Amino acid sequence: MNFSLLKVYTLFSLALVASHAVNPDVYWKSVLPNSPMPKAIKELVQTTESSEENNTEVGVGEDGVAVHTGKPGKQTDVGVGYGYGHNPFNYNYAASEDQLKDNPNVAVFFLENDLHQGTEMKLHFIKDDQKVTFLPRQVAESIPFSSNKLPQIYNEFSIKSDSMEAQYMKQTLRECENKGIQGEEKCCATSLESMVDFSTTKLGKNVKAISTEVNAKESTPLQKYTIEGAKKLAADKAVVCHKQKYAYAVFYCHKTFSTRAYSVSLVGADGTKAKAVTVCHTDTSKWNPKHLAFQVLKVKPGSVPVCHFLPEDHVVWVPY
């Protein structure tokens, strides 16, 4: 996305100078002194030493996994459900035509029965060139974040209303404003501080944040990966935060019960190693019956646990 980074960085600098805003990294350490900041969040924290980040998105399907993104102005593959398709991590939505039509064999979901040593999947890790950053809470809260204020928001970030970037932002706002499924507690965190506050309010301060990590700086080829092992991270609850397409870092965070989280070790045919965070939902009875997961896996709501890997730039919070 071709968002105005200069505008964002200027807002950040003004906040620090004018209001002595607490750096997001400092806030994290003050609230979570015993929880290391995962790579996915470090790359989005703006500091004076660093201002560039790389983000990645993941898709998982019956016959493999695609980890991919698109360049500005190009619709991504249907696997992660971005572009004009619905976000697959929002369980209220039926699968969009784009998600099923463009590449019906790529999806983000698989069955928990497949989560064991020796399972093989095809994966394609492609690094994203999107560069966004967290804004300090003071700055984020001073900027409108509402569908009713879209013209003002577009103007704030020099976004043309008919551009792909505008469509992404409109979709993000719509999903943030929609009501969650029954039993789901959700919020859209527009700053690192608000993400930390939501997660610790729901789970307590004895929590750790974990993200998927791949030991490759560049995109890797489409290849077969083998599961080497899977370690359970939480018993029945977690907060999962999904990064959204927006002019600055925004995460759709939700707490659901009947959830099992795993850290899954993978090795590719070329030796590439990855530790992929996996979330398994043991009760999908309240999901939209036409959700992408059911369409791809050919199962009914509430019948079997449904799992998905998290993209590198998403985060799962679990108690310890």
Image (cartoon, helix red, strand yellow):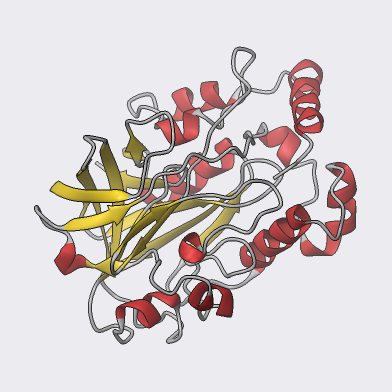
Residue 133 in the image: above or below residue 109? above
The C terminus lies in which quarter of the figure?
top left
Identify which residue, 36 or 82, lies in the foreground: 82
Q: Is residue 146 left or right of residue 119?
A: right
Identify which residue, 37 or 3, lies in the foreground: 3
Which quadrant of the view contains residue 204?
top left
Identify which residue, 41 or 194, lies in the foreground: 41
| Residue 54 seen in the current view | yes
| Residue 258 seen in the current view | no
Q: Where is residue 28 drawn, in percent x and y?
A: 48, 28
**View extreme (top): residue:** 49
Q: How many marks?
A: 0
Q: Where is residue 16 drawn, in percent x and y?
A: 73, 19
Q: Is residue 115 left or right of residue 250?
A: left
The N terminus lies in which quarter of the figure?
top right
Identify which residue, 189 or 7, lies in the foreground: 7
Task: Look at 90% across and 47% down and name the residue there.
Answer: 155
Q: Where is residue 180 drawn, in percent x and y?
A: 53, 71
Q: Where is residue 36 drawn, in percent x and y?
A: 36, 27
Which quadrant of the view contains residue 113?
bottom left
Task: Look at 68% across and 64% down and name the residue there.
Answer: 171
Residue 162 in the image: above or below residue 190? below
Task: Look at 69% across and 58% down and name the residue there.
Answer: 168
